[in-house]
Amino acid sequence: MEIYKHKVQYYETDKMQITHHSNYIRFMEEARTDFLEKIGWSYSKMESMGLISPVVSVDVNYKKSTTYDDIISITVKIKELSMAKIKFEYEMRVDENIVCLATSVHCFVDENGRPISVKKACPELFDLLSSLVENN
C-alpha cells in the first residue's frame, strides 16, 4: 500500500514550532481515510450502506518531535479484525526516523448507533479487510 504523506503546516505547531501532539490523531485519520479510499471502501461508501465505524480507543507513542515543513510518511496497517471491531496501526516517519507509533480501534455500528457484525452487514468488506490483516 502506498505510504500517506502529510506536510506539517505552520498552524499545526506551537510557540516552540513543534507539532502540537493533538495533530497526530488528525494525521492518523487522514492516513486511515486515504487507506480506505485506496482499497475502494471510503467512509462515504460505508455510510451510504448504513455502516459507521466510530473510534473506540487511541494509543499514541511519541518518539521524536516534528516541526513546520517536515514531511511525515505514515504507514497504515490493519492489525486485528473481528466481526465487531477493527484495529489499525500507524507508523509515522520523517526521513528514516520514527516520530510516532500509534493504534486506533474502531467498532462497527448501524445508523442508530447499535453494534453490528460487519461480516453479516457487509461480507465483501469483511473479506477484503480480513485479507489485509498483518500479524507481524
Image (spheres, rainbow, N blue to C red):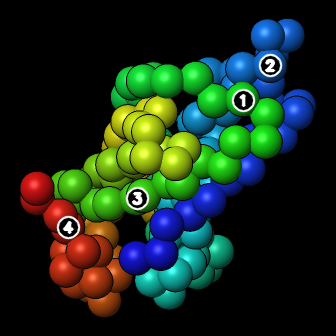
CA–CA distance between discs 4 and 2? 37 Å
Give percent across and percent down for residue 8. Answer: 75, 41
* Residue depicted at x 73% and y 50%: 7
Residue 104 in view here: no
CA–CA distance between discs 3 and 2? 26 Å
Q: Secondary structure at mark 1?
A: loop
CA–CA distance between discs 2 and 1? 6 Å
The residue that disc 4 covers is 133
Quarter the N terminus occupies = bottom left
The residue that disc 2 covers is 17
CA–CA distance between discs 4 and 1? 32 Å
Q: Work out whether mark 4 precedes mark 3 in sequence or the reverse, and give the earlier one.
A: 3
Name the one closer to the observer, 37 or 120.
37
CA–CA distance between discs 1 and 3? 22 Å
Q: Work out whether mark 4 precedes mark 2 in sequence or the reverse, and give the earlier one.
A: 2
* Contact between labelled residues 1 and 2, with CB atoms less than 8 Å apart: yes
Task: Identify the amino acid type marked 1.
Answer: Thr
**Residue 67: which disc?**
1
Labels 4, 3: front one: 3
Residue 95 in view here: yes
Task: Identify the amino acid type marked 3.
Answer: Val
Q: Work out whether mark 1 precedes mark 3 in sequence or the reverse, and give the earlier one.
A: 1
Q: Residue furthest front?
A: 96
Q: Work out whether mark 2 precedes mark 1 in sequence or the reverse, and give the earlier one.
A: 2
The residue that disc 3 covers is 76
* Contact between labelled residues 3 and 1, with CB atoms less than 8 Å apart: no
Labels 4, 2: front one: 2
Q: Secondary structure at mark 2?
A: loop
